[in-house]
Amino acid sequence: MDTKRDNAPNLNDLDRRNFLRLAAMAGLSTGFGASLGGGALSALASDLITMPFANGDRRMAAFPQKRDLILLRTRPPLLETPMAIFDQGAFTPNDAFYVRWHLPIVPTDINVDTFRVRIHGHVRQPIELTLKQILHGFDPVELAAVNQCSGNSRGFFAPRVAGGEWGNGAMGNARWTGVRLKDLLDRAGVLPGAVQVRFNGADGPEVPETPDFMKSLAIDHARDGEVMVAYGMNGIELPVLNGFPIRLVVPGWFATYWVKMLNDIEVLDHPDDNFWMKSAYLVPDNPAGNLKPGETGVKMVPISRLLPRSFITNIQAGATVHAGRPVALRGIAFGGDTGVAQVMVSCDGGAQWHPARLGRDYGKYSFRQWASAFTPAAPGPCVLMVKTINSNGLSQPLEPNWNPGGFMRNVIERTPVNVI
């Protein structure tokens, strides 16, 4: 593995006082807010690209604190990371990290001195915490974890389904710095009989009829010591579009639970029946989230755990390679809700599989780089494939799943190339 491609940030020396200084400078009350409008955005739109599925024409666009990303929607912002970014290392740069908001009112003027996180509900003592109290009143923790949209790769679903038509870039890996959610809950004192913890952020709907975006975790999950409230991302403060000043991090789970601009934590003594838990983000109750188009009577449950995935990042579909010459292959993999045990590569459409070399292990929830090589024997079409086997022995499937939400795709990716 090429160690020069190791872009892991060193967070051991993260100065939390410096974070507060940087955060105060990142209020961005004027320029940022102005740049979210359609007129300002159109001036920043650049090249037209075509994604490899129907209706795949997209513009590249630069939002504040972001480089050119693939634009799906401006309000609320949906921005996809180009796959070439993932060839640069195991960690996704903050300015290239994908963006997904559910509600159109996204605050752009965050005052770090007045921002509060309210913890209330089924607790002994409701409290409000300032950012300074969170940064200085609790033990800091660090964790590398993949954040992947539930609908990543939805554009490839066949038959097509409604929703943001993402390619494969609605994901990213970062080193998150923050505090344990458990410690915050313990400060308020969770009462016996607590069932779930519900999270809300500072974003909001355009009209009152739109349900506020809230997500919940089971009480034991919320208090497992891994779920965290993050204020740092790859060694610096979060970008505004990725949840500044703090967001929830739920390692090994889909990003719908990673509530951004977190300002409200409510302990419930009953199951959460709000729209975003009861009616949205539901998948078939089976390990693959799979059903047949038109099938009825299938039990649906809230989406939860990530599944293993892997990608070739240095060769695009349709690329040309030469017979008799070695071809380097590399990419990224993640194990879902556990680590990567093995990455296998096929250079003949799946007839034979060979183990790839694995790069540095940053933890079970992180991207892991892999590398391999092959020498095409003769001219003609060739299909490259890659699959991950995670630490639980779960492998990626040969056939794609389908569900009406366009969720949980993790089929083995195929990259056709031309050998000359």
Image (spheres, rainbow, N blue to C red):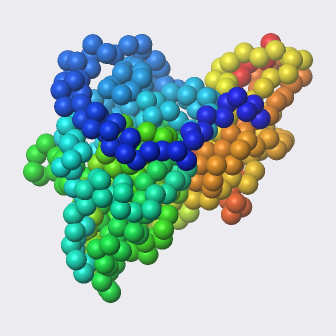
Image location of residue 319, percent across then percent down: 68, 18
Q: Nearer the viewer, residue 207 or 248?
A: 248
Q: Residue at x 43, y 30 (%)?
A: 95
Left or right: where 256 falls relative to 208: right
Image location of residue 298, percent across then percent down: 43, 66
Q: Residue furthest bottom?
A: 192
Left or right: where 414 falls relative to 95: right
Q: Residue at x 39, y 63 (%)?
A: 138
Q: Residue at x 35, y 67 (%)?
A: 184
Q: Quadrant of the C terminus?
A: top right
Left or right: where 410 falls relative to 136: right
Q: How many marks?
A: 0
Image location of residue 86, percent across then percent down: 58, 32
Q: Nearer the viewer, residue 171 or 145?
A: 145
Q: Nearer the viewer, residue 77 or 153?
A: 77
Specify the quadrant of the image occupied by residue 281: bottom left
Q: Quadrant of the N terminus?
A: top right
Q: Would you place residue 50 above or below residue 91 in this image?
A: above
Image location of residue 19, percent across then percent down: 37, 42
Q: Is residue 353 visible?
A: no
Left or right: where 277 falls relative to 150: left
Q: Would you place residue 337 above or below residue 58 in this image?
A: below
Q: Is residue 347 visible?
A: yes
Q: Residue at x 42, y 23 (%)?
A: 67
